[in-house]
Image (cartoon, grey):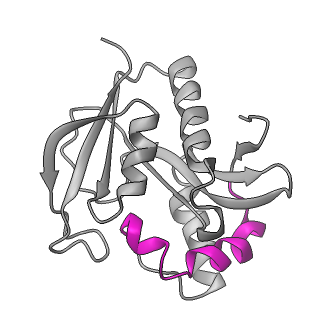
Amino acid sequence: METEKILLRPWLDSDADTLFKYASDPDVGPRAGWPPHKSVEESLEVIRNVFNKATTTWAIVLKETNGIIGAMGYGASCDCKLPTREGEPIVGYWVAKPYWNKGYCTEALRLMLDHIRTTTEIRSLLCGHFVDNPASGRVMEKCGFVPTGEECYDETQYMGEGRPIRILRLELKK
């Protein structure tokens, strides 16, 4: 899957160094509910046991440099306690700090949504963001997700205790 600027591709073991470079930043993971990575080996384990276990998680690659700048995916999403409907996947993503506020995450989410619409029978998707990360919510809304009016607290998320999560949903098919 690709646009003029980015492509979404499967994660490779050889991406572990780059993943660690960005996922070890203490400003990145906690915004999405996961702890900063502590080693390249941990990043490799995430690639093998999280990203590649779900066939619906991709590396976001900046075509200009051929470098990975983040991740985009959907699925059951670990132990998240978001209020999904039966069979409703959760969307998750992150982009490395040097690429924040440049439109790459929105572009990647739109690309993935086009893929979902054309290749699946998924009827709706759920997304959530910590209320102290409004930029993530703006990405969701730009891509058509609508606030449900619900908030939840998910203590299973890293630093989730006491941090409300704003819930948004995208209806794909009626």
Residue drawn at x 61%, y 65% is: 47
Q: With respect to residue 120, does 162 lie above or below?
A: below
- Say if the magenta span includes residue 24: yes
Q: State the residue in front, 57 or 111.
A: 111
Residue drawn at x 51%, y 61% is: 50
Classify the position of the C terminus by image quarter.
top left
Picture quadrant of residue 8: top right
Is residue 34 shown to the viewer in this render?
no
- Give residue 39's position: percent from left, percent from top: 60, 87
Residue drawn at x 82%, y 49% is: 63
- Give residue 69's position: percent from left, percent from top: 68, 61
Spot the residue most to the bottom: 38
Q: State the residue in front, 37 or 51.
A: 37
Spot the residue most to the front: 101
Classify the position of the N terminus by image quarter.
top right
- Give residue 86's position: percent from left, percent from top: 22, 32
Q: State the residue in front, 103 or 52.
A: 103
Residue drawn at x 21%, y 33% is: 85
- Say if the magenta span includes residue 72: no
Q: With respect to residue 119, does 72 lie above or below?
A: below
Is residue 25 shown to the viewer in this render?
yes
In this image, 140 relative to 66: left or right?
left
Q: How many marks?
A: 0
Q: State the residue in front, 107 or 23.
A: 107
Spot the residue most to the top: 174
Query: Over which residues does the magenta segment extend?
Result: 11-34
Secondary structure mostly seen in the magenta stretch: helix
